[in-house]
Image: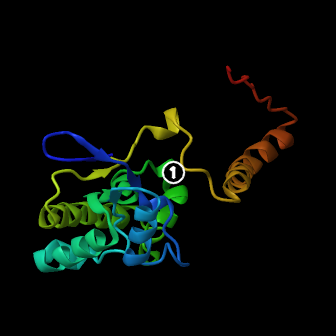
């Protein structure tokens, strides 16, 4: 919801990141802002996405942020927040989830979780500066979650992750099982059924 400083509801707002794409109307700020306005939205959470905003420039230039806000106003919506969900999540990714979150990092940082974390923290800080330039008092996002492997199955695993996990188990266990075979000793795995 778009809310004014008196905490009065002003109308519906929409989280645009879920719609961002390379085809119109999801490919540029003027297009997606008009699309949101045509849906009846009054506000938008403007994704920190190069198709819509240059975060480096926005962090440095109030004039640039005024231009961005003007494009949105002209389309009939106002910016309610800059969401940094993926960047915030990359600040603290549990190593068990590194492969799943790798796609959210710039290509040059893929496979480099420490560098991803540093980059992501910098992005969230730049978004704070851009938010101030836009006159926004709130920024939304995720904090990252080092305990997620124990609690919540998100994001969805990439294709091949389970197969690779079992392949790695095989690589680690084959020499152990071969040694048991040489000794004529069976190795019995104790299995526990998951509680539902």
Q: Which of 117 and 196 is in front in this view?
A: 196
Judge whether 47 appears above or below 58 on screen. above
Where residue 94 sits in the image (x, y, percent)? 44, 48
In this image, 184 relative to 195: left or right? Answer: right
Residue 125 position by quadrant: bottom left
Query: Is 178 located above or below residue 72 in the figure?
Result: above
Q: Name the residue under label 1.
A: 97
User: In the shown orientation, is residue 86 left or right of residue 98?
Assistant: left
Residue 29, image x and y in percent? 37, 75
Q: Is mark 1 on a helix, strand or loop?
A: helix
- Residue name at image x 39 percent, y 56 percent: 41
- Tell me where residue 159 appears, x and y as whole percent: 69, 59
Q: Name the residue at 62% across, 52% down.
A: 157
Q: Residues within 10 Å of mark 1 (few under 14, many from 20)?
A: some
Note whether 10 is above or below 18 in the view shown: above
Counting labels gives 1
Q: Nearer the viewer, residue 57 or 120?
A: 57
Q: Which residue is drawn at 80% across and 29% down?
A: 188
Query: Is residue 50 in view?
Result: no
**Can residue 155 be seen from the camera position used here?**
yes
Q: What percent of the width, then of the height, locates residue 142?
A: 35, 48
Left or right of residue 168, residue 9 in this image: left
Of all residues, the one furthest to the top in this rendering is 195
Colour mapping used in the image: rainbow
Give the quarter of the figure containing the C terminus. Answer: top right
């Amino acid at each position: 919801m778009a809310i004014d400083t008196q905490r009065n509801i002003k109308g519906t707002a929409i989280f645009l990141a879920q719609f961002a794409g390379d085809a119109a109307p999801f490919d540029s700020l003027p297009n997606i802002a008009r699309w949101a306005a045509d849906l009846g939205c009054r506000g938008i959470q403007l994704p920190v996405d190069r198709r819509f905003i240059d975060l480096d420039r926005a962090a440095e230039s109030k004039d640039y942020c005024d231009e961005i806000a003007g494009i949105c106003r002209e389309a009939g919506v106002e910016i309610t927040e800059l969401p940094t969900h993926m960047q915030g999540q990359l600040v603290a990714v549990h190593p068990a989830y590194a492969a799943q979150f790798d796609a959210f990092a710039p290509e040059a940082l893929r496979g480099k979780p420490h560098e991803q974390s540093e980059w992501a923290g910098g992005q969230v800080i730049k978004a704070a500066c851009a938010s101030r330039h836009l006159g926004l008092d709130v920024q939304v996002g995720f904090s990252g979650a080092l305990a997620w492997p124990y609690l919540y199955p998100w994001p969805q695993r990439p294709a091949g992750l389970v197969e690779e996990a079992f392949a790695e188990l095989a690589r680690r266990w084959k020499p152990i099982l071969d040694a048991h075979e040489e000794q004529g000793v069976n190795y019995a795995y104790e299995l526990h059924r998951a509680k539902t």
